[in-house]
Amino acid sequence: MPHATTPLAPHERYGRVAIWLHWLLALAIVGAFCVGLYMADLPISPTRLKLYNWHKWAGVTILALSALRLLWRLTHRPPALPSRLADAMPAWQRTAYHGTHHLMYLFFFLVPLTGWAYSSAAGFPIVWFGVLPLPDFVSPDKALAKLIKPWHEIAAFGLAALVALHVAAALKHQLIDRDGLLDRMRPAR
């Protein structure tokens, strides 16, 4: 079994930009999800309206960060899994590793796009940070809004489940396997 005491070579770690995009997107997703859960059951009030705006701003930011992260990923090949780690992983774990990452990228876009579509269909425009008005994703249509809203919620909970699985796997590698896999995405010390 590999040990964390074997340091990763620089070519086995993600680059600085990939690491920062990973952690910024992680914080934005967790923050937007928590605000979304909290605001959903609030009565109509100035606080609820403010939180809805923050949630929308976070969603647009997540969408922008996701596009940037995908562009970076397509133009900067990620480091291969170190052979000492790949050899110790059963095939199903490698498949789950890749599958979870692909699904998370899908949901990085699906969640904010369905939120934007819902907001547009409900007739509530998005003005990013109160400064930049964004075009409606779809035309205002209350019936369509009613159809889209559950898809946004389902997608958000799907992304939350994938994030929880991703975190659990990272912690398993760090605390149980002690193989140093988490160091690939940690900022350099």
Image (spheres, grey):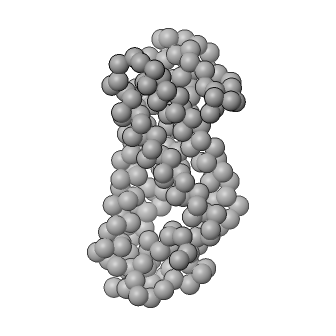
Tell me the quarter of the picture where residue 99 sits.
Answer: bottom left
Q: Going 35% across and 55% down the picture, which residue do you hit?
A: 165
101 lies above or below 182? above
Tell me the quarter of the picture where residue 91 sits.
Answer: bottom left
Quadrant location, the N terminus:
bottom left
In this orientation, which residue lies closer to the viewer: 77 or 119? 119
Examine the rendering and report whether any part of residue 95 can be seen.
no
Q: Position of residue 189 (x, y in %)?
A: 53, 77
Q: Going 60% across and 21% down the picture, which residue do you hit?
A: 125
Residue farthest to the front, as pictured: 46
> Is 168 displayed left or right of 20 in the figure?
left
In this orientation, which residue lies closer to the viewer: 47 or 19? 47
Q: Position of residue 169 (x, y in %)?
A: 36, 64
Residue farthest to the top, as pictured: 142
Q: Going 38% across and 59% down the picture, which residue do you hit?
A: 167
141 lies above or below 186? above
Residue farthest to the left, as pictured: 176
Q: Going 63% across and 32% down the picture, which residue do you hit?
A: 128
Q: Position of residue 45 (x, y in %)?
A: 41, 18
In this orientation, which residue lies closer to the viewer: 16 or 156? 16
Examine the rendering and report whether any part of residue 31 can be seen.
yes
> Is 74 displayed left or right of 117 in the figure?
right
158 lies above or below 98? above
Count of numbered circles on the image: 0
